[in-house]
Amino acid sequence: MAPALEDELRQVVGSSHVLSRPEELLVYEADGLTHHSATPRAVVLPADKTEVVQIVKRCRAHGVPFVPRGAGTGLSGGALALDGGVVIECARMNRILRIDPEDRIAVVQPGVVNADLSKRVAPHGLFYAPDPSSQQACTLGGNVAENSGGPHTLKYGTTTNHVLALELVLPDGKLVQLGSATGMTVGYDLVGAVVGSEGTLGVVTEATMRLSPIPERVETLLGIFGEVVSACRAVGRMIRSGLVPAALEIVDRRTIEAVEASVYAAGLPTDAGAVLIVEVDGPAPAVARQVERVREHCVAEGADQVQVARDEAERQRFWRARKGAFGAMGRLAPDLYVHDAVVPRRKLPEILESICEIGDRHGLRLSNVFHAGDGNLHPNISFDRRDADEMARVLAAGEEILRTCVEAGGVISGEHGIGTEKRDFMGLLYSEADLEAMKKLRAAFDPTLVCNPGKLFPTTRFCVEANPKARGYDQVPLG
Amino acid sequence: MAMSDAQGSPPQLAELELGTLDCVHCGLCLSHCPTYRVTGRETSSPRGRVYLMRGVAEGRIPLGAAVAEEASLCLGCRACETACPSGVQFGSLLEQTRAAVSDAGLRSGLAARLERLALRQLVPRGLRLHVFVAALAWVQRLRLDRLALLLLPPRFREIHALLPPVPPVSQRRPLPRSFPARGEPRGRVALFEGCLMPELFGAVNRATAEVLSQQGFEVVVPAGQGCCGALQAHSGDLEFAKGLARSNVAALAPAIEGDAIDAVVVNSAGCGAVLRELDHWLGDEALPLAGRVRDVCEFLDEVGLRGPLEPLPLRVAYDDPCHLVHAQGVQEAPRRLLEAIPGLEIVSHEDPSACCGAAGTYNLTQPEMSRAVLTAKMDALASVAPDVIASGNPGCLMQLRAGAAERGLGARVLHPIQLLAQSLAR
Amino acid sequence: MSAAADVGSLAEGLRRELGAPAVEEIELDLEGARLGLRIAPGPGGALGAALRLLGEAATPALVRGGGTRSAFGHPVPRARVLLETRALLPPTVVDDEDGIAYLPAGAALCDLREHVRKVSEGRWEIPLDPPGDSSTLGGCLAAAAAGPLHAAPRDAVLGLDVTLASGEPTRCGGRVVKNVAGYDLAKLYVGSLGTLGVIEGAWLRLQPAPEAREVWWAPVDDPRQALAAARAASTRVAAWLSREVAAELGAELGENRAGPALLVELAGDAPAVEAEARAWAGRAGAQRLEQGDPMAWLRARQGRPRGLRVRVASLASALAEVARILEEHGAQVLAYPARGELHADVDFSPGVSGDATVERILRGARLAARAGQGDFVVEDAPLAIREVREMFGDPEPRLALFRALKAQYDPRGILNPGRQAGRV
């Protein structure tokens, strides 16, 4: 009985595009979050939407769940196939179907790599704004599923602000068009609901993305600080003053050391406590002014030095260093847990101190490289998953960090999603009724829960005790 | 089937595991991997292959057919190393894996045996190779090869298409043992000749020696040097390759001793990559050699060209050999040298540092994938319509030449040093 | 039988829960509904209790904020209760250090804008356009009301407090500016026309007030020519006005203006605005408008009922064609080229104008939407027309999902039933 589904899938996509040997399945057991794993039943690589429709229908007929997957760079276990599910790997659906420079839109298949889109539209003076650090590998389909962010979301918004229309294979195998190329919503905003739904509402087979004009002028500054906390204060000053840089990133000392030892070395000062990367862009006269304002804010918070990237090549090096930071941490230990939480920006200095204290108390190597302008923290913990004791401390510290952020009015994920990683922490943030409201959306799209089951929602009662403070306005007492 | 649960030896696996631990699964390598780009399969990506290696090393999966297939499907281009922020030594891991696959008897087909025979008994044996190439020249001259093609299975057509016309005898004569420094002397270098280079690309070796000499360097061509071992190591015959490496260390030792030379200059990226990392194979004894190895373009760029350069009004597409850009980190030097030639315009095609699919003997062992990778490369090159395609590695030159011929591109395919030699001719 | 009699027993229960002053028996025909009860519950428990009682009695409510957008969407003939949101006034928070605010759904957006301006000493603005003076925040969000300055309320919303039809209070999103913890339900509620739940309050992202601001006017024949200007770097709004609309504005400003024109607001850093203004000054016929507030006029015009109005979305490249089609079908056109949005008005007086007028503009809208590869909605139409015609382009392909959503969030159909696309 068991092999029947695989045989049907082979008929749909051809036998070389179905993987089912144990060795092949092993490599699909994890995404970027290596300490969560689940072995899929099979991996199937469709070439187009008609194949996706067929795959979904076959899986459904066999009662086998399925999960769409992009490049597997997600950091919350979102692409794991739980319950013996089938992975629908979208990497072969990697064509840019249409570029319309005048209308500033591109229609893409889900497997197109994020950075490739910007590269392809650059000759038209355009770019695709959301730029997650994994942009040279991650796919736009994955970005849609996770509502991915990146450094430049501070000014440009996250993926949801750049998706105009979607084509979706519903969990029952029907193909629907949501939204329109003009971005207009008629009726319920289903595009808005699907973006960030972590692949639980269907399989995206086409997406119409908004492109942005490359700004006339871009300047990237490095504020070099003795302490990471003073860099945070400089960020607070800029936000308060109404300055909206294109990006505001903090890289701490441990991260600088790792990056500077890697192929992404950019000449960041390894003796600095932290570097604040500030990018301002826009019309040339405005940028010149903003550069001065940024400089003043940094100096006011005690920056040792403020440098401006000398040329485009140096700018690119800074960004490559920033975006290679996660991988570079592999130099410190075999595994890396990249956390993701958001706090109100004015709380950054104290939260960061608490996080470092938590790391120290658990005897862990913790570093911070994050989207400071959004209050989006990424405490990175280097560890070795083979060391059970260390693993336990990593998890304990992670939970403490999340609780600290939530108590400060923050949330448990800014851009990585919930997946399997944080499903049992949803109760920190949401009441039972809040989660029920989300389940209603799920039920409208996928009443039988075959599409990426086991994600996003708590599985145990362990953490889900309704949080009495999980309401909006009565949670306000803040500073 | 009996092989399916074969395992490598414990020390081999321990070393392998240690190497795989550098990978934190970030995935930045994926889109840089030619085989991943063609297949979309995680298994055929660097991250996936490292995961397989770790799986084998930890005993979670057997060292069986699936792993062997992936080890063999990898081009070994090492583009992933250039992309890896964590510094995973992928080339070295691949070499160890292929050796383990080979030791476990997982490469036992007729093709594998023929390949090993050729790589052990023909390629590194100078005289035999010379005779073989001479015979090949006669076959080509009498057009016997066309006849043979009618009789042989289609796969041989691919191989045939790759074989360049054997150059005339005048270009296959051994190089003189030394070239004098002309003009104001600037130093002394040793030239590494390689095995296939003298037979199939003698003109490149000669151009290399002449340019160095013209630039004021005395060039010595030490006797006793031979095949570098790259092809053998890539095919999993690591111990044999190490043997070849030892004899090169011995042959070049007299020249290196007492700091008598400034550099060992190599014009084949594949050989250069091996020689440069020879200490990985042989330990400290290889350091004096490894530390002196320079690619010819890198060397000339470092010391600075001495003019005058004659104009060459050509549009040149420079395509990075993987083992130069990814394994040796030499990317800008050849471009700077070419740009120094008046009238020469470098036209930029997409992804110049992506593999062309030659990868040593890969185009023979994995013709399908090699073709897919070459197609993407030729698409990129065709779109800029260059007069010359320049690349500094014999395998790439053969592959690109075959690709250009098949596409009907008018472009000549040359080693950058040949363009320099032409421009410096007077 | 009177409308009040239908809801007699319900009224008692509601009085008990909400207190007598919040419940009033009425006889009112509104939106095709015969309403017998008007309630204005407060936030939290009161709203929840009211919805629970409505659910138990299976009595639908017409949910209403300021009423400025009540002609948008289908009528709600089954409603018996008028649920007014004006008492949904949870405490306001303006965090001017973080540039965010928590604002009550029942308050008038104009008042809230003034409040934020005052509290932040003019440094921050609410990025929403109130269609009219009485428009509430909740109403603007539920109707996804677009104005001249801000096309998409969805992008301003960080989090929402929503009481579902079941009476359960829920929250989605939060106060932070980036958040992917769970589904982005705020997107679903914004623009849902009150059919899924009742918004009580919202966390909004504020925007820094621009340092400099200037309004320019230039004659431009073709909306397509307006596109480049609309996309200039420091342009905050660019509206293209067809002949009649331009004349209307001229009259407002006490000037005689003939011919289609472009109205542009430059806003942002002073040096950028200055540079842009210099470019405008060199343009034939361009003129800086220094008196009145043309943008406020534009907002008010857009909020004012005209009798018949459609909004069409178009790709930038098709703007001129779309505008032409709409004008050909008898409409006065106002276009926002940068966002591919066109508003087409037809003066319509019930009893005087005939069915043919309606027929004509709807046909025009459909053709225009097709030409622009976009979509259209009817934003304003007399009740009689809304009773029989679909107001939301062609919802058919998505109707099954719309219905499934409604069934999940409001299974008893007590919140504005039938108002949404496809009469969901």
Image: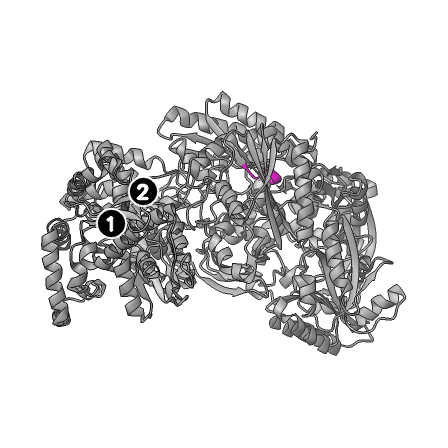
Whether residue A14 appears in magenta in the rendering, the answer is no
Q: Residue at x 31, y 36 (%)?
A: B19
Q: Residue at x 28, y 68 (%)?
A: B405
What is the crowding at mark 1: few (fewer than 14 residues within 10 Å), some, or many (at least 20)?
some
Image position, residue C19 (x, y; %):
80, 39
In the image, what residue type sits under mark 2?
Answer: Phe
Locate residue B244 relative to residue A198 in the image: left or right: left
Q: Which residue is mark 2?
A: B90
On screen, residue C122 above or below B31:
above
**Residue closest to the far right:** C254
Locate residue C375 relative to residue C37 in the image: left or right: left
What segment is highlighted magenta in the picture?
A: A370-374
Q: What subunit carries mark 1?
A: B
Separation of residues labelled 1 and 2 (CA atoms): 41 Å
Q: What subunit carries mark 2?
A: B
Front residue (pair C368, C279): C279
Locate residue B97 relative to residue A188 in the image: left or right: left
